[in-house]
Image (cartoon, helix red, strand yellow):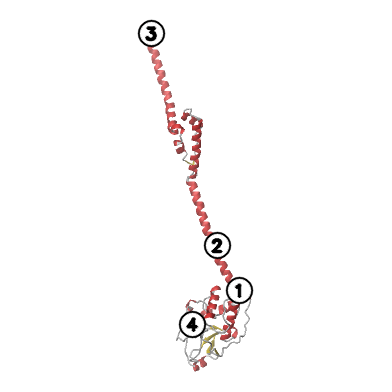
Amino acid sequence: MRIVLVLICSFALASLALGAQQEKKKEQPKKKQAQSAQHAAGPGGGPQKAKGSQKVATPGGHRAAVTQPSSVTQKTAGGGSARGAGAQKTKKAKGSQQVATASPGAQKTKKKTKGSQQIATQGGQAAGAQKTRKSKGSATNAAAVQAKGKPFKAQHFNLASKTKPNKSVAPAVNFQQGRRIQGSHNWQGSNYQVFRNYRSEWHDRDWWRHNHSRIVFVFGGPYYWNSGYWFPAWGYDPGAYYAYDGPIYGYNNLPPDQVIANVQAALQQQGYYNGDVDGLLGPLTRDAIANYQRDHGLYTTSTIDRPTLESLGMA
């Protein structure tokens, strides 16, 4: 009987040991899962793993926050307080904002928007500058058209052109053989060809009379007529006076002094010339012509040429 009781007790103990071992094996996965959750959450339900888990790439290249189920939080915390879970949720939300702000898509959008604004601003400035220049040019052209639309009526002025003027008012220019007009090589077009080709020439009286049939005297200086322009006849009178050495456009078939006087009157009306209408192409008159030409987009010849007279409504 004792042997039977011993066998029965041994079998019972073995069964209990086997059951305990199987129960222990069943509990080990649960403990490992709880330990993993505790490691993920950190002490006190902290946001260490949760913050890292929020950096999840989405198909659009953005990062989105991943919120764990409440059951995992309860398991991890081991039945912890609601304050810990609330703090974890708050920090998750904060982390989600940080991730969303720092996402490549947001930065790219921000940079692209900023760049677009800069390009738009620069483009607007460039367009504005171009529009301003165009308006200025349009105003210049409009002034010229307006001048053409209101022709300047030629007048006859009483000038002391039979005597030599005071040289302090209009200093005389000296003769230089073959002198060219300064800057004329830059003046393009048929209207300026006569200025590009001009050279000072000295000939005696017989030569001038033989080659040119029309010669007039203005302020003691002889001028000859050729192809619509008046030119100084250097050498016709060795003591002649000239305030300017170069061609003068023959406006309305008038002599040189009357052409100059009408230009002075036209420039006076437009506020460019403040001197006397004396028929002398002196420094004050040449400066007034140059200022007018610059303002109206013409070559700055500082003398009387056809484009300038057309702009003034005189040709």
On screen, residue 28 versus residue 217, left or right, reads left
Q: Nearer the viewer, residue 266 or 153?
A: 266
Q: CA distance from mark 4 to mark 1?
A: 29 Å
Q: Is residue 107 above or below residue 71?
A: below
Percent x, y for residue 238?
48, 91
Query: In front of the other: label 3 or label 1?
Result: 1
- Mark 4 or mark 2, which is nearer the start of the sequence? 2
Secondary structure at badge 3 equals helix
In the picture of the structure, the residue carrying the numbered disc 3 is 5
The residue where tag 2 is placed is: 128
SS at badge 4? helix
Camera-nearest label, 4 or 1: 1
Q: Quadrant of residue 276?
A: bottom right
Q: Which mark is residue 197?
A: 4
Does dot 2 land on a helix, a strand or a loop?
Answer: helix
User: Residue at horizontal 42%, vertical 21%?
Assistant: 23
